[in-house]
Amino acid sequence: MEQKALECPVCKSNKAEIAGENVKLSGRFEDKEFLTTDLTVLRCVRCGYYMFFDKMAQFTTKES
Ligand SMILES: [Zn+2]
C-alpha cells in the first residue's frame, strides 16, 4: 500500500480535514465526458487548499 506523508503543496502544513469521501468528479475534455474513480477530498486547515486522493492512498495522519 502506498503511504503518503500529507503536506499541503501551498503552505506546507501537514494538517488537513476530510472534506469528502467517495467523491467522483466529472468533466469534459475534447467533447468526451469523463468520470473519475472514487476520491477522498482533504482540505488544508490552514489555507483551505483542496487535495484529492484516490482510495488506494493511505495517510500517515488520521482523524482519531
Ligand atoms: Zn495549506
Image (cartoon, rainbow, N blue to C red):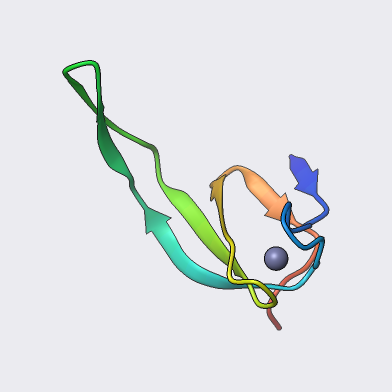
Whether residue 29 is situated above or below residue 40 in the rendered picture: above
Q: Quadrant of residue 20?
A: bottom left
Counting from the top left corner in percent of width and height, residue 60 is at: 81, 60
Task: Residue at 41%, 46% (x, y): give it.
Answer: 38
Position above or below: 18 against 52: below
Tell me the residue at 16%/18% (across/down).
31
Give coordinates of residue 61: x percent, y percent: 78, 67
Camera-side residue of 7 and 60:
7
In the image shown, does 26 or 59 lie closer to the viewer? 26
Q: Residue furthest left?
A: 31
Among the 4 quarters of the image, the one containing residue 48: bottom right
Quadrant of res 56: top right
Q: Is residue 60 left or right of residue 42?
A: right
- Left or right of residue 26, residue 48 in this image: right
* Quadrant of the frame with the C terminus: bottom right
Question: Quadrant where the N terminus lies?
Answer: top right
Q: Quadrant of ligand 1?
A: bottom right
Residue at screen point 46% across, 49% down: 39
* Number of marks: 0
**Where does the image place residue 37, in percent across and percent down from the top left?**
39, 38
User: For this rendering, which residue is in front, 57 or 5?
Assistant: 5
Q: Is residue 53 above or below residue 64?
A: above
Counting from the top left corner in percent of width and height, residue 28 is at 23, 29
